[in-house]
Amino acid sequence: MALTREQLAQRVAQELQDGYYVNLGIGIPTLVANYIPKEIEVMLQSENGLLGMGQFPTEDEIDADLINAGKQTVTMATGASVFDSAESFAMIRGGHVDLTVLGAFEVDVNGNIASYMIPGKLIKGMGGAMDLVAGADNIIVTMTHASKHGVSKLLSNCTLPLTGKGCIKKVLTDLAYIEIKEGKFHLVERAPGVSVDEIIKLTEGELVIPNNVPEMKL
Amino acid sequence: MALTREQLAQRVAQELQDGYYVNLGIGIPTLVANYIPKEIEVMLQSENGLLGMGQFPTEDEIDADLINAGKQTVTMATGASVFDSAESFAMIRGGHVDLTVLGAFEVDVNGNIASYMIPGKLIKGMGGAMDLVAGADNIIVTMTHASKHGVSKLLSNCTLPLTGKGCIKKVLTDLAYIEIKEGKFHLVERAPGVSVDEIIKLTEGELVIPNNVPEMKL
Amino acid sequence: MAGFDKVVSTYEEAMAGLEDGMTVISGGFGLCGIAENLINEIKRKGTKELTMVSNNCGVDDFGLGVLLQDRQIKKIVASYVGENAEFERQMMNGELEVELTPQGTLAEKMRAGGAGIPAFFTATGYGTPVADGKEEREIDGRMYILEHAIKGDFAIIKAWKADRYGNLVFRKTARNFNPMAATAGKITVVEVEEIVEPGELDPDQIHTPGIYVNRLILGTFEKRIEQRTVRTAQS
Amino acid sequence: MAGFDKVVSTYEEAMAGLEDGMTVISGGFGLCGIAENLINEIKRKGTKELTMVSNNCGVDDFGLGVLLQDRQIKKIVASYVGENAEFERQMMNGELEVELTPQGTLAEKMRAGGAGIPAFFTATGYGTPVADGKEEREIDGRMYILEHAIKGDFAIIKAWKADRYGNLVFRKTARNFNPMAATAGKITVVEVEEIVEPGELDPDQIHTPGIYVNRLILGTFEKRIEQRTVRTAQS
């Protein structure tokens, strides 16, 4: 079975380590915050200028001056700090964030990512995504493996305008956990109940299959 | 009579305007603070990260954490702000300081200034001087017109390593107030009791003399 | 207005000198930390052909979005234009020129504009449409593109508190682009929720020194919330 | 040390991993805001061939000056080296390599190092010895030179207060180069006068967020004054 959004978030959360500063993109990445293992501490960076993002506010706590990068009202965690956008992206661009999780439309075997624009159709802007992919060493892309019509999003070459070039090494889709190296996708794990053949069928870019492809543990 | 250090400071102070943010270099420029006209307000910027430098502290007020760019203990004026060195030079380099007053070894007809180094003899470093001359539109250089041995410091070409190129338009010496334009010195005022001939004799670079050269009013 | 007192009493005074064709840099992220009343004053004035530099362009009926209604904006430099139907419509129809700029690059371009840094290299946008027509360079084995500073004829800023000298303090994430924008305007206009006397703000805790501020006005704010997300008290 | 607790209890731990030949970026302006005890620990360790990046190099017997006595410094990048006889002697004799760097450029190089900006243009130093060997370029009718970022293997920082997570607050002009230096170290070590619990510092008033800080130690400081200038109480 393909992973649900919640399961994708759960699997990403397994990559978190104690003491990590983490930037979670809008959408599925945001859900990762719900699955942080109890025994570790992570601090969430929101690129509009907050390190130590807390949970959503109660009605009483709502503060128009305190939002996250998705423009949602949030709270601050203990030990949080606030700063301006230049400082926020100094942090991001300077490689100080330990893990970045973001969504994408397409990823290719060379680690290119397209996530911000569908020409003639969807032009919302890249927001902080280009800085995030350029600045982070450790990025996990979460996305569906293919479109509803079965068109693969893991390609030999991205077809949409790029968000970043050669910067993606890890992709978690609803079907598989894949690493990108030496110009190829490498299948590392498969979603529970999903066969290697299904993954092969829905992966357009070259995919290396090891002898053993374990199921994800969730 | 050549101006004293105090008189130089007094003459520079006449250039101050109400609401000016001013950076005063080490030495004679520092003395300018003592001659700010009563009817105007100026705010002193110290490039180590203080806007609104106050007077020297009393014994009781001395604070090792509060110094100026000359490393002297100071106080803060009402409405002062403190910031880091990057912000301080953003202010300076970005042209936000209204007037900069600094000393020099040599100035030439092209507005070049040499003030930080005498090769093989004096190598203290440029500190913030290169940023100050590059960032300010409005700079007054204060210096003695010539060395003790009568060697002019107002030259056709600076002989010492430059602090800045083509950035000086106003020079106040102990003998004269001079403006630099179109590759020439222009005599604007002379020190009380100093003759135009004396000034000509001690000015190596081309000097334009208008018909009337008023004495400075101090 | 003597000495360093930056306070003006009317919005007309606050935006005096704004002319057709000028560039205006705006602080704010979405609807958070925007100079609501300065924007409304620009609408009232009806100034046209503006180039707006701002991370976002508000929503249809609030924030910078209100300037789209009367076609006051010729060009916008922004990182994200979602959540604004009129914006998308004008852009798609070619009525509005849009220069999409990565958020961090935009922040840095404003800072650079204020700080006398005319251009800088960044890896952000290399190999993407953002790099089109820009210089590329390898430095220490990595590829970068050259980005240039942005300056504005005006900067419109929302702060929390200020003293009369224009020293500013921001509150929570309403800070965002405001401090950089404040440095990059030839005329920087700030509206705030509270004005205190010089000396009342701790000098160590001032976010934006008054040297960057030209005019200061006391405002009242709606502070509209774009995404009202809440949890129940027990969760 | 679990989670975000950055506190270490000994100076040995604080400077563990410092090796011969490394680059160390130091905060401080003159003797103001310097990491006195971290410097002394470097002296105690006897690490050699260091490249020090700091606005000044202390005085003969205090601050970074103490590292000159045992010739621990191979090269220094600084803006001003006056008031230090041993420094001048070693420099004149060619025993010490000195890269004189304008103060603002130095601050910006540190900031750039921490901010992922590999290089930037500045007018500072154009037409001077500082420009030797550097790229020059005209931008909008003015000449600029290209300067590159600085990063350190270590950064040694003095702050006033910190919480255990490494969020820092500086005091008065002891701030100076410290915030930029803190961003530019692979390992950033901070000594402070007071450590509080997370949550005790106002998030809006933190000068350096803990993300830049790797190790934190509580110190006691001499705070020597270089130029003790006073006025009489009545003046």
Image (tube, coloured by chain):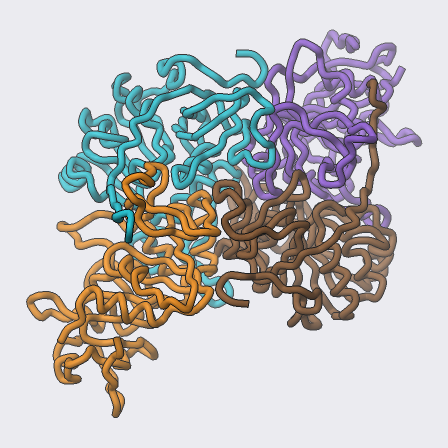
Chain colours: A purple, B orange, C brown, D cyan
Q: Nearer the viewer, residue D108 or C5?
A: C5
**Residue at the limit of the structure toward the left, as seen here:** B149
Pick the quarter of the image with the N terminus of chain A: top right
Front residue of A157/D66: it is D66
**Image height of C160 relative to D14, above or below:** below
Residue in view at x 55 percent, y 52 percent: C197
Is C175 positioned to the left or the right of C206 in the image?
right
Q: Nearer the viewer, residue C126 or D188?
A: D188
Percent coordinates x, y for residue C6 in the rendering: 57, 61
Residue for point 41% across, 46% down: B49
Question: Residue C47: where, in percent of width, then height?
Answer: 74, 70
Q: Position of residue C190 (x, y in %)?
A: 63, 56
Left or right for D172, reference B74? right
Q: Residue furthest bottom?
A: B211
Residue B128 lies, in percent from the top left, at 34, 51
Q: How many marks?
A: 0
User: In percent of the image, x 22 and y 35: which residue is there?
Assistant: D59
